Amino acid sequence: MGTHSHPIRRTRRGRRLALALTGAATAGVVTVTGLGVANAAPLPALPGLDLLQPAGTTEVNEDFAPFAETDTRPDGDVEVNEDFVAPAGGGTGSLRLDTPSSSAKATLFRAAVSPLADWVDVAAYSAFRSPDSTASEVQFPSLQLVIDFNGPAEGGFSTLTYEPVYNTDAGASLTAGQWNRYAAGSQGWCSTRVIPGVFGDGQNQCSNGGVLPLAQIADLLPDAVVTSFGVNQGSGNPGLTSAVDLLTTPGTTYDFEVRGPIIVVPEPPVPGGGHPGGGHGHGGGHPGNGHPGNGHPGNGHPGNGHDNGKGKAGHGPVHQRNVGNGS
Ligand SMILES: [Ca+2]
Ligand SMILES: [Ca+2]
């Protein structure tokens, strides 16, 4: 977190988490509790999102699970934080992507197999472009589907890409400084490679009419399967800072949210230590003055406690989380 500028100040929740972390560091270590906040409220009717209401949402936290950084390159960075907050219905966090240099690349993908046809009219995502970005004004993070376009037959690798700039006629917004919703599943896509009968020679990389509706691509490739999907920014997008949230797929909508540090609750109450229940973050509220003495009872923090106290919040006892693992 430290290297980024934060054009939008952190939310109240972010500060509360920081305080809770302090509390955890001074308390005895016994019980670990996650701070994840589920999105219980129904999502608003956004284009492409309404189609998947029954499937609900899957929260993705700081460790990215079930996604992974597949091809982030030097200078590029992805991070779940609250720098740009979130679109309506998307909680308070999102996935920030930074590509300060031309060679930088920021990616986050999930490997999962599904028929390409399932993505038609379904795929959607929300993206925010920081107004501080110096990149060409048409650049936004893209949604990508890695496909095997001929199914079980040999070969067939390509990546389909959706970029808002090629879909402005369909209503895709290129406005910076606000959250835009992209109904990618009903709009135009490109292919990184030639696909016989679909994207001819010279039509890859969006060139020479190489932007086709996803429905048309899927109709022409009945055996095609998506093998992984995710968001990509760069290379070739120097000076672009953005965020993505509410990534809608055939199985679920992924909601990037800050879970924050794991809260460590002292138990049983420390004799004379005062606030036993203080572990809930209240303890953190008055960390320094509260219980400096019993904060380091020698036996109290054999390792675990220190891990929690360190800066990279949330990256400590990752295994303690009950990460939602939707399909
Ligand atoms: Ca979110
Ligand atoms: Ca194949």
Image: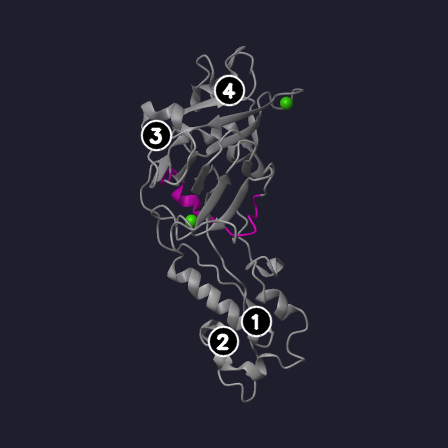
Q: Tag 4: Cα neighbours inside 10 Å, few (<14), some, or many (≥20)? A: some
Mark 3 and 4 residues: CB-CB less than 8 Å, in contact? no
Q: In the rendered view, tell whether residue 95 sits above or below residue 281.
A: above
Amino acid on which the number 2 mark rests in the picture:
Pro
Residue 205 circle label: 4
Amino acid on which the number 3 mark rests in the picture:
Ala
C-alpha distance separating marks 3 and 2:
48 Å
Magenta stretch: includes residue 63: yes
Magenta stretch: includes residue 3: no
Query: Where, by quadrant of the figure, is residue 265 drawn?
Result: bottom right
State which tag comes first along the sequence, 2 or 4: 4
Residue 172 circle label: 3
Disc 2: residue Cβ within 8 A of ligand 1's nearest atom: no
Q: Residue at x 55, y 49 (%)?
A: 325
Give residue 133's position: percent from left, percent from top.
Answer: 41, 38
Residue 287 circle label: 2
C-alpha distance separating marks 3 and 4:
19 Å
Q: Tag 1: Cα neighbours inside 10 Å, few (<14), some, or many (≥20)? A: many
Mark 3 or 1: in front is 1
C-alpha distance separating marks 3 and 1:
46 Å
Give the colour scheme shown.
Answer: one colour
Residue tagged 1: 25
Name the secondary structure under disc 2.
helix
Q: Tag 3: Cα neighbours inside 10 Å, few (<14), some, or many (≥20)? A: some
Mark 2 and 1 residues: CB-CB less than 8 Å, in contact? yes
Amino acid on which the number 1 mark rests in the picture:
Ala
Q: Residue at x 51, y 34 (%)?
A: 232
State which tag comes first along the sequence, 3 or 2: 3
